[in-house]
Image: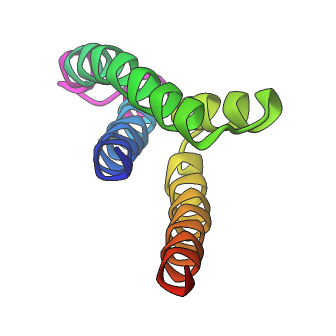
């Protein structure tokens, strides 16, 4: 579960950064080819963001996150670079929880 979420967080984050750079190239720098680049990356990001939402929601449901945290994780795929930071925090938190649960089981 965590691995699926992490992969999609990175993929979504990279595509969003590329999309942002493409939009800058298209509208601010008026570069040739930026229009088609932006279209392709935008479509890819849109479809893969849906998968990111599914995996993040699944992870949040199983981790029993509060609604506010769940929403923040879901929206991280819409803010350039936020997915990287949120993914790192989620991974640290869940790995610590798994280690804590494993230690509790080992004591029992």
Which image quadrant: the N terminus? top left
**Colour scheme employed for the rendering of this structure:** rainbow
Q: Is residue 42 left or right of residue 29?
A: left
Q: Determine whether, in the image, residue 107 is placed left or right of residue 38.
A: right
Q: Is residue 34 magenta?
A: yes
Dividing the picture into quarters, in which one does residue 69 lie? top right
Magenta highlight range: 25-37
Using the image as rendered, state which of residue 98 and residue 103 is in the foreground.
103
Q: Of helix, strand and loop, which mostly describes the magenta segment?
A: helix
Q: Residue 60: give x, y in percent of width and height.
A: 58, 35
Examine the rendered structure and indicate whether residue 20 appears above or below residue 51. below
Q: Is 90 on the left-hand or right-hand side of 69?
A: left
Residue name at image x 21 percent, y 25 percent: 37
Q: Quadrant of the C terminus?
A: bottom right
Q: Residue at x 29, y 23 (%)?
A: 48
Report the front residue among 3 and 47. Answer: 3
Task: State the image coordinates of residue 39 (x, y, percent, origin top left).
Answer: 26, 14
Q: Quadrant of residue 47?
A: top left
Give residue 98's position: percent from left, percent from top: 50, 67
Q: How many marks?
A: 0
Q: Is residue 65 left or right of residue 25?
A: right
The residue located at (38%, 50%) in the rendering is: 2
Residue 29 coordinates in the image, percent (x, y): 42, 34
Q: Is residue 89 above or below residue 2?
A: below
Q: Pick whichever, 102 or 66, lies toward us.
A: 102
- On screen, residue 47 above or below 48: above
Going by the picture, which residue comes out furthest to the front?
Answer: 108
Q: Verify whether residue 81 appears in magenta.
A: no
């Amino acid at each position: 579960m965590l691995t699926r979420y992490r992969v999609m967080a990175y993929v979504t984050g990279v595509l969003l950064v590329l999309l942002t750079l493409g939009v800058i190239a298209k509208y601010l720098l008026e570069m040739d080819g930026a229009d088609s680049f932006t279209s392709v990356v935008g479509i890819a990001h849109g479809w893969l963001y849906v998968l990111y939402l599914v995996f993040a929601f699944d992870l949040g449901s199983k981790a029993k996150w509060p609604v506010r945290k769940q929403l923040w994780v879901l929206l991280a795929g819409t803010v350039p670079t936020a997915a990287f930071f949120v993914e790192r925090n989620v991974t640290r938190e869940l790995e610590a929880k798994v280690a804590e649960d494993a230690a509790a089981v080992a004591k029992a």
